[in-house]
Image: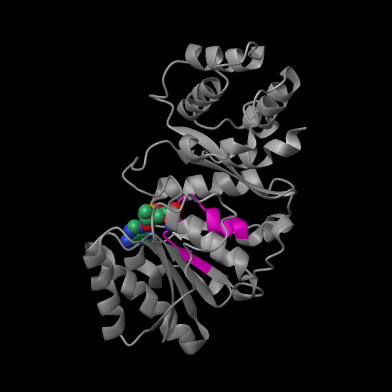
Amino acid sequence: MTEKYRKLQQQFLCCYPVNKMAWSSVKLPLSWEEQQALMDATCRHPLNQRHPVRRSYVEAFIKQLMHLLKDQDELHDDIYGSLCNRMAEGSDTGTVYSYKHYILQPDACITLRESNSFVSEGTTGLCTWEAALALADYLVEHPQLVRGKNVVELGAGAGLLGILLKLPAMSLQAGQVLITDGSEPCVQLMRENIALNFADTAKEQAPKAEQLQWDAVSEFPWQDYAETDLLLAADVIYDDSQFDALLGAMDFFYTRRGSQLEMLLASTVRNMDTLHKFMTKLRLCNYKVTPCANVSACASHFCRDHTAAVQVISIRR
Ligand SMILES: C[S@@+](CC[C@H](N)C(=O)[O-])C[C@H]1O[C@@H](n2cnc3c(N)ncnc32)[C@H](O)[C@@H]1O
């Protein structure tokens, strides 16, 4: 029975915008059993019971569902119950963190603890941005880019990409994966998220998370890590005061690995001038930039809603 609500389930668990959900999969009227199955697939799903999604999201979901069922004689107790429980909990204010669950295949799911705010604790990295989801989709579609490669991610935020690359159920077979960020709260969050997703995995098979400021890249103990084959970065081109630090970090990696190193950089197209400025700097530094396939059109394993345009480029030198 829950099978027919699979899409809604996937969307609910990663907080996909309520007004864009696959409501057309709900064929009215819903019997008592069907209402039960819909609630079991979403609010009462074991993942949500254990690591709940944002409360305000649950409220919006239930209200939308009640609106859909407004002409029905019987509304399941669980629907009322979920809304009452949600109301009794009060507002989300003060609850800084909640969870998102990305169901990628029947047996592959990534759970991330994330901040409810886009900016908190002095960083933008405590939640997952559209560019990271787009790059994750791109890597799932092109596993040959990561197979056997030792990967370093810069500005990794909550840690989605590194977790994806090492998730046993996804079999992407990346080599050593090191996810880094300059912000200490991000590194703590990445470690928590690694622990959440690799509880049953040997420590050496999980990604590692370390603090790394772009302007201090040469001070990092690289002798403890394998040579980097692939650099990843998502949504790091928004503040031009950080461009030189980022280019300095890139220069450090390319100087060590030369043409053997590829970087995949995903950027949300918010401000064309800022992106253009960075692209110009890349060319001045003799990087060869190749736009990758149009990621807006590629299948979304991560339930992206495609409202933000994201560009992914490959950078070589
Ligand atoms: C918009 S967030 C993107 C996070 C993640 N990549 C994503 O797309 O979800 C930018 C990230 O870059 C990190 N960052 C910004 N400037 C940095 C620097 N100079 N050194 C290291 N990390 C930096 C921030 O701490 C933040 O986590």
Query: Residue, x 54% and y 20% (percent of image)?
Result: 66
- Counting labels gives 0
How far across and how far down the image is residue 283, in percent?
30, 84
Q: Is residue 210 visible?
A: no
Q: Is residue 162 magenta?
A: yes
Q: Nearer the viewer, residue 195 or 106?
A: 106
| 256 in relation to 144, above or below | below
Q: Which of the 4 quarters of the picture holds residue 298? A: bottom right
The residues colored magenta run 152-164
Q: Is residue 181 visible?
A: yes
How far across and how far down the image is residue 29, in percent?
66, 23
Please state, as top left, top right, bottom left or bottom right, where the C terminus lies in the image: bottom left
| 134 in relation to 247, above or below | above
Quadrant assignment for ligand 1: bottom left
Query: Residue, x 47% and y 57% (percent of image)?
Result: 132
How far across and how far down the image is residue 184, in percent?
41, 49
Q: Nearer the viewer, residue 155 or 300?
A: 300
How far across and how far down the image is residue 225, in percent?
57, 71
Q: How is the image coloured?
A: one colour
Name the side, left or right, on which 110 lies relative to 58: right
Q: Nearer the viewer, residue 224 or 235?
A: 235
| 121 in relation to 253, above or below | above
Q: Is residue 97 magenta?
A: no
Please state, as top left, top right, bottom left or bottom right, where the N terminus lies in the image: top right
Name the side, left or right, on which 164 lies relative to 132: right
Q: Which of the 4 quarters of the picture holds residue 22? A: top right
Residue farthest right in this picture: 1
| 96 in relation to 11, above or below | above
Name the side, left or right, on which 37 lies relative to 133: right
Query: Residue, x 58% and y 13% (percent of image)?
Result: 80
